């Protein structure tokens, strides 16, 4: 089935169809071009998004990079960035293999179609010109026949007219003979023209136009095949990057699975563990005793210099709250501004860096020595004296780094001994707030009795522990007092004590059942709430013992 046979009389239909096919090709090229722009914009936005959320600090300077959740998030961002690169690759493939190739092919098809249509129109024009010549010769033959018949009738009439002269009769007969001869010539010309036109017409309909139609059919089929291949390139471009995109998605899934809750908790400990020992119990100071007792009678008396001894909150208030806001501290080379554990870790890092630098300088010195030996054995390769400045500089660096290593080793030994000295059995103290009492609190008399018993017990313990604490007037936070100075704060609410609580441990405060208190700090998740009593004094009480109302 071909167009030349089946569509021999549908020139305009073929012309419209081939034009529609080329328009469809151009529409597809435009669609792919816009699709490419969408992919490029998508990839650009993804890269901008990744850049926005990537950490700004280098990994070695960012403590958050040690957490698995942060590492997983960075890994996901990197996978998204790789995914954006694959979208750019899709856009590039579509632009080159589809847009450019099909656009160029469309122009070639348009030129070929134009050539075939022009050839068909020329054939039509030639056939129409032959038909006009045929019609002209036909009309001439018809006219000459009428003229010859008219001349013959005139000659016959004159021949029968007795009044006509012989000369007129002869003239009429000659005219009739001439017209008859002209009609015969017109007849022959018309017959020849008709034969030529029939031949041209047969060639036009059975040979010339079918060939042109077949060429247009072949062109259109090739265009259709090429367009189908272009459709396939659209999916092929996606399939080409699908393995990489799959790896990106698998990387995201692996990053999600890599989040390690326990490890992150351990990392937080390693990053911020101070190494301090927990504070011990506060010594009971009995202000009910006479104040003029000799210093030797009680440790609560007046010092020998005559000045009253500071007691209670006035003595230890600035050192009781290691959780307060820290003031800015001056960074020192030996990291003495840091807590013991953090200082030890920073010194360990510095020592490792200095050792690596020292090893690097030693390796460079060995390399320079070998090069110098080669120059001495083979002078044409270089001057040994030219290496002396570099060797001298390397030796100076080695000596400097050795001194720094010794310095950091001494500091590290000091820090480690400090950490070991701060470790004790205080880890088991006050690990959780007490549970609320199962029943109503005891009456005041029993409370007073138990309170007196606890006070006497505290006095006993204080007297027993006093010798052990001699020479330890400076608390464990002495070097960091400036970091833990308490700042005055206003209440953030109020609360009422539901139960009686005896604050006998470090940092706690006593309260009576039904007492109104000022809320200074909410529970941070450890079960303790910071309050202030109306008569003065701040401290922590169990959250479950309070009914809290925020401002």
Image: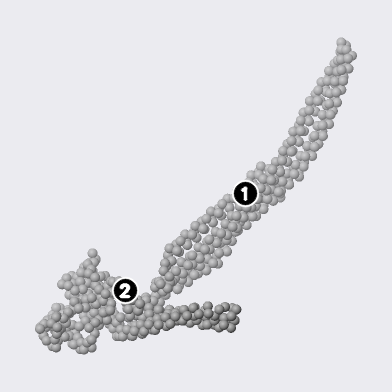
Residue 248: image location, x then y, percent: 51, 67
Q: Considering only vertical position in the picture, is 78 above or below 213?
A: below
Res 63 quadrant in image: bottom left
The C terminus: image quadrant:
bottom left
Task: Report helix, strand or loop for mark 1.
Answer: helix
Q: Considering only vertical position in the picture, is 355 above or below 74?
A: below
Q: Residue at x 73, y 44 (%)?
A: 209
Is residue 352 visible to the viewer in this orientation of the structure? no
Residue pushed farthest right? Answer: 166
Q: Specify whether 355 is left or right of 118.
A: left
Residue that carries the numbered disc 1 in the rendered image: 22
Task: Report helix, strand or loop for mark 2.
Answer: loop
Q: CA distance from mark 2 to mark 1?
A: 77 Å
Q: From the viewer's perspective, is the residue at label 2 or at label 1 nearer?
A: 2
Taking depth in this image into account, of 38 and 452 the one nearest to the observer is 38
Query: CB of mark 2 within 8 Å of CB of mark 1?
Result: no
Q: Residue at x 21, y 76 (%)?
A: 317
- Crowdedness near tag 1: few (<14), some (14–19) or many (≥20) residues, C-alpha within 10 Å: many
Q: Earlier in the sequence, mark 2 or mark 1?
A: 1
Which circle marks residue 330 in the picture?
2
């Amino acid at each position: 089935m071909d167009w030349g046979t089946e569509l021999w009389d549908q020139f305009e239909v073929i012309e419209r169809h081939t034009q529609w096919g080329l328009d469809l090709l151009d529409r597809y090229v435009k669609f792919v071009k816009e699709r490419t722009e969408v992919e490029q914009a998508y990839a650009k936005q993804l890269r901008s998004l990744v850049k926005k959320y990537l950490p700004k600090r280098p990994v070695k300077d960012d403590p958050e990079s040690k957490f698995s959740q942060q590492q997983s998030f960075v890994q996901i961002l990197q996978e998204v960035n790789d995914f954006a690169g694959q979208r750019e690759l899709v856009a590039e493939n579509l632009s080159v293999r589809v847009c450019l190739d099909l656009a160029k092919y469309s122009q070639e098809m348009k030129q070929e179609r134009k050539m075939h249509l022009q050839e068909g129109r020329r054939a039509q024009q030639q056939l129409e010109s032959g038909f006009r010549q045929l019609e002209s010769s036909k009309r001439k033959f018809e006219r000459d026949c009428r003229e010859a018949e008219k001349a013959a009738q005139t000659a016959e009439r004159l021949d029968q007219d007795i009044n006509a002269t012989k000369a007129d009769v002869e003239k009429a007969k000659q005219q009739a003979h001439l017209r008859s001869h002209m009609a015969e010539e017109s007849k022959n010309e018309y017959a020849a023209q008709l034969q030529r036109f029939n031949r041209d017409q047969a060639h036009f309909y059975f040979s010339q136009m079918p060939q042109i139609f077949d060429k247009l059919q072949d062109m259109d089929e090739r265009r259709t095949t090429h367009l189908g291949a272009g459709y396939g390139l659209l999916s092929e471009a996606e399939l080409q990057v699908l393995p990489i995109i799959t790896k990106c998605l698998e990387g995201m899934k692996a990053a999600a699975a890599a989040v390690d809750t326990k490890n992150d908790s351990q990392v937080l400990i390693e990053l911020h563990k101070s190494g301090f020992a927990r504070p011990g119990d506060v010594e009971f100071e009995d202000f009910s005793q006479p104040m003029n007792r000799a210093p030797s009678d009680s440790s609560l008396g007046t010092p020998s210099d005559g000045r009253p001894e500071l007691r209670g909150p006035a003595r230890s208030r600035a050192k009781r709250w290691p959780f307060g806001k820290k003031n800015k501290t001056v960074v020192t080379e030996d990291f003495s501004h840091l807590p013991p554990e953090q200082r030890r870790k920073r010194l360990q890092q510095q020592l490792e860096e200095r050792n690596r630098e020292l090893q690097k300088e030693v390796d460079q010195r060995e390399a320079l020595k070998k090069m110098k030996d080669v120059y001495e054995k083979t002078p044409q390769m270089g001057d040994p004296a030219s290496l002396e400045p570099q060797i001298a500089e390397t030796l100076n660096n080695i000596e400097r780094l050795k001194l720094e290593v010794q310095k950091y080793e001494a500091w590290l030994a000091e820090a480690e001994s400090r950490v070991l000295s701060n470790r004790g059995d205080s880890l088991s103290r006050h690990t959780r707030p007490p549970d609320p009492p199962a029943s109503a609190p005891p009456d005041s008399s029993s409370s007073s009795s138990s309170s007196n018993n606890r006070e006497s017990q505290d006095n006993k313990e204080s007297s027993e522990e006093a010798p052990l604490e001699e020479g330890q007037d400076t608390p464990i936070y002495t070097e960091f007092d400036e970091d833990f100075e308490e700042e005055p704060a206003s209440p953030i609410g109020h609360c009422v004590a539901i139960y009686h609580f005896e604050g006998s441990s470090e940092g706690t405060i006593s309260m009576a059942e039904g007492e109104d208190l000022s809320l200074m700090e909410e529970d941070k998740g450890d079960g303790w709430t910071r309050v202030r009593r109306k008569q003065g004094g701040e401290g922590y009480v169990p959250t479950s013992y309070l009914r809290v109302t925020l401002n």
